[in-house]
Image (cartoon, rainbow, N blue to C red):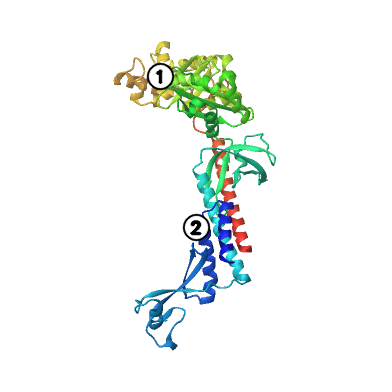
Amino acid sequence: MNATELSRVIESIGKDRGIKKEIIISAVEQAILMAAQKKYGQYAVLEAHYNADTCDIDLYQFKKVVESEPEMLEESEEILLEEAKKLDAEAVIGDEIGIKVEAPEFGRIDAQNAKQVIFQKVRDAEREIVYNDYVHRKGEIITGIARRIERGNLVIDLGKTDALLPRTEIIPGEQFRPGDRVQAYLIDVRESTRGPQLYLSRTSSKYLMKLFEVEVPEIRDHIIEIKACAREAGVRSKISVYTKDKDIDPVGACVGMKGIRVQNIIQELKGEKIDIIPWSDNPVMFVRAALSPAEISSIKVDERNRTMEIMVEDEQLSLAIGKKGQNVRLAAQLTGWRLDIISKSKLQKRTQDAVFNLQHMEGMNETLAQAIFQTGFLNVKQVAEAPIEELQKIAGFESPEAAESLKTRANIVIEKSGELLAAPTVTDDGKGSFSASPVKDAKALAEERLKEMIKEADKKKAESDAKATEDIK
């Protein structure tokens, strides 16, 4: 390859692949060095430099200046002082002097090796460019074209590279065919032996939040803030919004004129129902809004355990709980409180049972039993086992003496009746109530672990495939 051809190749590869000229030049220099090392010996000290003036590669061999008998000279590493002075008049013994030598002629094997070196350098540079392009785009929405399915995961063509949409990150019921446009949320960018691996998601709650940011200018401009989001992909989601501007309705802005903004998002999510809720720093008001459209009759708050007991009318119970507990479960995740939903009739029955149970203590009338129940005690055993400090919170039993007396009376009842009064007289059949925690339940946690296991298995398979490919080469 002459200088003109080399220059043209460097320019062409750099332009076609979007790779810096310096990287391609470095690859060519390395290829020249590999071939030169075979010609001049493995101990020869060689350097190759691209000459921008001649558009060619200059090869230099460095030798140590010595004073020695010619027959003892290591020609690949040493040069006599007399010869060195011809090249550099100021050369002295011990110096290292660079001598320009002829670049070797490339044989078939050398050319193949050089080609592999250059291709590898170019491939590494392309991978680095792709990684740098996308690592800063984590948390953005990415659009590509569906190409194929690998082990249930969808491969998305992004142009410069492919991304993976794992089957666990596809909305249930969605089906894509090769050539379909796919929009998703970029959740991670990882380096691997096969180059950068991009992972997408369509089920993440962050994807929903990003869609609102795209559709609602007020969110992009930070006039409206998304405070929290809870999502069961493909079925239902709840999102809470807030603004400091009193002239702006955050819910209305997210819904849009005639619902156009939220409808665009629903269409992208294949009909997923979305509840937009005004955020409030008052937990009770926030929970009321989060459980809409159900109407709440009363809420009993336990600040210490971050729990709310919510009473609803019997006809509102199914609406508050939602299909398979979906409404209250999403509300709990959105607000961060444990929510115990109970119907009015069941609460009345529970109250009657608890008051009846507590009245077995000596000197206990209905009013005092109601006060004990309102503090959170459901039966005599709970009173007997409670610390004095807890009993002092009951109205009428604030003094240590009164609380101690109450505890003594409860213990007397337990001693006489055994376990008969350890619980309400009527067994809870689970009907008329429902509880939801803001923490994901065991099933959800198991699904999360399964997702991680699948990702890890895919990673190991990719590394195994890459190793097998290298072994073949």
Q: Is mark 2 on a helix, strand or loop?
A: helix
Q: Which quadrant does the C terminus fall into?
A: bottom right
107 sits to left or right of 387: right
Q: Which quadrant does the N terminus fall into?
A: bottom right
Front in this rendered view, residue 393 or 289:
289
Kind of residue indicated by mark 2: Glu
Q: What element carries label 1?
A: loop
Which residue is under mark 2? 22
Front in this rendered view, residue 341 or 354:
341
Q: Position of residue 165 (x, y in %)?
A: 60, 42
**Count of marks placed on residues:** 2
Q: Nearer the viewer, mark 1 or mark 2?
A: 2
Q: Earlier in the sequence, mark 1 or mark 2?
A: 2
In this view of the protein, can residue 174 be seen by the observer? yes
Front in this rendered view, residue 444 or 373:
444
In this view of the protein, can residue 341 be seen by the observer? no
Kind of residue indicated by mark 1: Thr
Which residue is under mark 1? 375
Occupied quadrant, residue 285? top left
- What residue is at 57 percent from the left and 14 percent from the top? 314
- From this view, report whether residue 7 is shown above or below residue 279: below
As measured in the structure, the alpha-carbon distance from the residue carrying label 1 to the one carrying label 2 is 76 Å
- From this view, report whether residue 164 is shown above or below residue 89: above
Q: Position of residue 226 (x, y in %)?
A: 48, 27
Q: Position of residue 420 (x, y in %)?
A: 49, 23
Q: Which residue lies furthest to the front in this view?
A: 53
The reply to whether dot 1 and dot 2 touch (C-beta < 8 Å) is no
Say the numbered circle drawn on residue 264.
none
Occupied quadrant, residue 326? top right
154 sits to left or right of 79: right
Q: Residues within 10 Å of mark 1 (few under 14, many from 20)?
A: few
